Image (tube, rainbow, N blue to C red):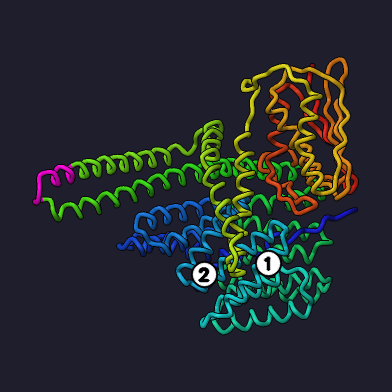
Amino acid sequence: MYLPKPVNYLIPILLFCFCHTPAQSQSALIQKEQRRMYLIKDSIGLVNCLNRIGMLYHLKSPDSCFYYGMKAKGIATRLHYPKGKTDADNVIASALFLKGLSRESLELFSKVLLGYKQQSDTANTAQALLNMATVYASMADSAKATELSRLAIKTGSKLKQDSIMSLVYANYCMINSRLSDDSIGYYLDKARAIAGRYKDQRMLILIIQLQASYLLNKGRRQEALPLISRSLSESRKNGIEYFEINSFGLYADYYASKPDSVLDYYNRAYKLVEEKGYVFLKVKVLKVILTYTELSGNKDKIISVHRLLEAALVAENDNQKKFIADYIKYNAILDDNTLLETNNKSDKVKIWMLGAVCGITLLLVIFIYRLYQTSRRLNRQISEQNNQMRQTLNALEQSQADNTRMMQIAAHDLRNPIGGITSVATLMLDEPGRSDDDRMMLELIRTSGQNSLELVSDLLQVHTHAEEIKREPVDLNQMLHYCADLMAHKAEAKGQHIDLQAVSVILSVNREKLWRVVSNLIANAIKFSPSGAVITVQLLENLKNVTIIVEDHGIGVPAEMKDKIFDMFTEAKRPGTAGEQPFGLGLAISKQIVEAHGGRIWFDSRPGDGTTFFVELPI
């Protein structure tokens, strides 16, 4: 019988979420900080406390992490407290990454990095570089991850207090898969020495778990066993619940050939996840438990685990929808308030300057009075905006349709400013004399901007319904020729050729939306095909249907991605053969458009030999 290996899903740990606090139970630390929060009287202290709580919540509940980060950001913005605002952005970016929004988290981490540099905070600058490296590693961009990790090492080497360097060295080992055995040993020894010098129990346990994981991967199981046992003992001794859960995962990896033992350790992990409220890990643990429960053949237990997993997935999906809508709404209102606050402050300065000479002439008195009226009007607008914010926060459970509409409005409004940012970054890159660090940051900004523009275009097409379709007679042959001609330059850039074979068919469709479907399919074929490939586009007709076929000879779709490829915000994303970045929205939007026309879309793929997409529309 084939036994799937229990993936040790908890390593690498999200290092940017480490809090340098005494080794205590994470739950106890959260409760302690929450009690202390109510005793704080100064606003800056409150912002710092909220940011600490947000970081402590990072693995227990990314939603709570996000909530405390946004709350801290709101207060820090009103106080004009730059460090508190940058720390809050770091918490929010961590939550975005944990919720699967890697590109959004990278964009915010870039802002965090710039903020810490402006504040001359070298330790947190190194930490921000480490955060970005971790996100790039999760996106399978190992080159960028390694580059940023090395930059973090270079930055951290300037510190007098080098406690953070144990974290940097450990992260470098996890991110850089090409390190030799000797190099891994060297960096882990350096990390252990620094952690021991600062009595950092969290890092010492992490290093033990990294060594155990490394030995397991090398097949040196007997050497790994005492390290696993030690990591579990130390985790319990220090009350570090997350590492205790991770230790169970390592035990399961050790007993990979014994399904009953694997199931036992993951059941222990799940019990701890439930008891301590680690919402973020619930689905991951249940998926492994289901796999090994199915091997046991116990139908009652299989049904029970299925129900638990289904409930966890439903809750996670609902939270994800609310999370995205909350983020868009809150930021839009927060930006409006910041703008109004800035305008109000400017007007007050003018009033005080004019007030110094208010007794000179009646004309100046009238002018000051008008400015005062303007200031009052702005204050009323701010008050109305604050009321709107409270109403919005109380209405976070609106329907999916409302969430989608708000997302599309926000996406539309973001198009111009993002385009402007991208253009400015491009102009600055063209200027000579810039340092490598500046060019790297500008390149990150430009890449993030370009990717964001593509994402905005996709978001504006989300959720197309049949009642929204405005049809007109369209010559599909002519439309396909237009699409092929438009995409020809992209194909030529990769040395590819588009072969169009189409019959003449007139069909009542929405020209723009169907053009988007075909363009997206051809663009994907170009993206995932090698240089010199031929992409075939066909238009066939029978008595009942018209079928559009787009065939490539590229890398194909892996079996594990086939069920997810049409999902909205799918994880089934891979870079193209030339490094092109996907967003996971194009095929989901195409499916909505085709189904709104009463048709269907499907594909046939042979990994390594290409993919053929079919779009069938009724006559």
Residue 543's place in the image compared with 285, above or below, is: above
Res 311 quadrant in image: top right
Residue placed at 63% from the left, 34% from the top? 461
Q: Is residue 27 left or right of residue 177?
A: left
Residue placed at 88% from the left, 35% from the top? 499
Res 536 quadrant in image: top right
Q: Which mark is residue 247?
A: 1
> What secondary structure is the magenta-colored segment mainly?
helix
Kindly indicate whether the residue at mark 1 contacts the one at mark 2 (C-beta within 8 angstroms).
no
Is 362 colored magenta in this rendering?
A: yes
> Quarter of the image containing the C terminus?
top right
Q: Between residue 473 and residue 120, name the one nearer to us.
A: 473
In the rendered image, which residue does mark 2 sit on? 124
Measuring from the top left, give residue 130's x and y in whole percent: 61, 67
On the question of residue 274 being in view, the answer is no
Please tell me how many numbered marks the rendered image carries.
Answer: 2
Measuring from the top left, give residue 328's x and y in whole percent: 51, 43
Residue 206's place in the image compared with 511, above or below, is: below
